[in-house]
Amino acid sequence: MTPWTFLQQKLTQRIPAMLLLVLQSEGSSPGRQGFKMAVSADGGLQGSIGGGIMEHKLVEKARGMLQAGAAEITTLWQHHDKQHPADQSGMICSGSQQIAFVPLSKDDLPLLHGILEKGKTKWLFVSPQGLRLDTSDTEKTHLFYQDKNTWNYTEHLHNQPVVHIFGGGHVSLALSKLLHFLGFYIKVYDDREGLNTLEQNVFAHEKHHISYENLRENVQSAPDDFAVLMTMGYRQDKLLFRQLITREWFYLGMLGSKKKIETLQAELAGEGLGLEHWAKVSAPVGLPIHSKTPQEIAVSIAAEMIGRKNGGGEI
């Protein structure tokens, strides 16, 4: 659950809630610009603005504001330095961050619905006057700050990343669990009926029993989606890869040994699919951390996906 879905849930239940948003950060502050946390009057919370004693203190402050019926947006600096003359966070990691406290009510539900709507590029605008959403193009995330009454924060809201996992075995289950925690929307596909690991997968948002023969009819994807190939065998991998490589993916990875990948590359080259098609494929998929168990393999794949998502360059 994200802070946005948490806020939507609480406000739908008519429980007062507040968004804590890091407007700007300096130095090695643990809370970076754009970090968010949601706090509700019934004691719930979701997200993080940097952790530690600072976060605990600010959560209590937010709860006190909710109990007092606060309606205005306020900001607060926190300095992670015991030598700073004011607004010390209680942490010693150095750096500073400015947090906005944004009270929300049921009247903000349409805005939250818009934020959570899939398929549209959106920008969030925050100022002392409130929150609003726009779909027009603008600059990347930035803050203009003059004083406590004159400032505005703009953030490009990215859609929830979507990952297609082909194969529903043990590694698929472990990867789904990890990616669910990391905020991905997960679709898992397998051609086997009654597969226990697929039935046990409560982390995938969608589970599909399909034929691998024709993905055109069975799988809908977008150019900014992730895909990971990890079927039960070589034949299925080859069948799927020939189809997946014809689509545009933000990230495409294939599970397997180097020997398996080399064999597949040689066979496909003989069928007219040259090595140039592998340029943007991570194969073998995952970071080289000598992983052995399904859980360790999942960590290596997820880490590589995060690096790609956060601008770590081509695979």
Image (cartoon, rainbow, N blue to C red):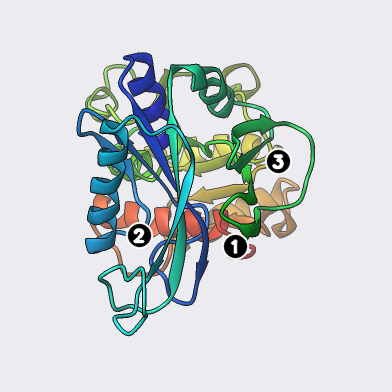
> Is residue 222 depicted above or below 30 in this figure?
above
Q: Residue at x 38, y 45 (%)?
A: 182
Looking at the image, which is closer to me, 134 or 313? 134
Q: Residue at x 28, y 47 (%)?
A: 61
CA separation in Å, label 1 and label 3: 15 Å
Q: Earlier in the sequence, mark 3 or mark 2?
A: 2
Q: How many marks?
A: 3
Q: Earlier in the sequence, mark 1 or mark 2?
A: 2
Q: Residue 108, position in %: x, y?
A: 51, 22
Looking at the image, which is closer to me, 223 or 139? 139
Q: Are marks 1 and 2 in contact (CB under 8 Å)?
A: no
Q: Is residue 94 visible?
A: yes
Location of residue 106 by image quarter: top left
Q: Residue at x 27, y 57 (%)?
A: 296
The residue that disc 3 covers is 248
The three-letter code of the residue at mark 1 reads Ile
CA separation in Å, label 3 and label 2: 36 Å
Looking at the image, which is closer to me, 37 or 70? 70
Q: Secondary structure at mark 1?
A: loop
Label 1 vs label 2, nearer the camera: 2
- Relative placement, left or right, of 233 versus 39 is right
The residue that disc 2 covers is 50
The residue that disc 1 covers is 315
Q: Secondary structure at mark 2?
A: loop
Q: Residues within 10 Å of mark 3 (few under 14, many from 20)?
A: some
Label 3 vs label 2, nearer the camera: 2
Q: Is residue 285 visible?
A: no
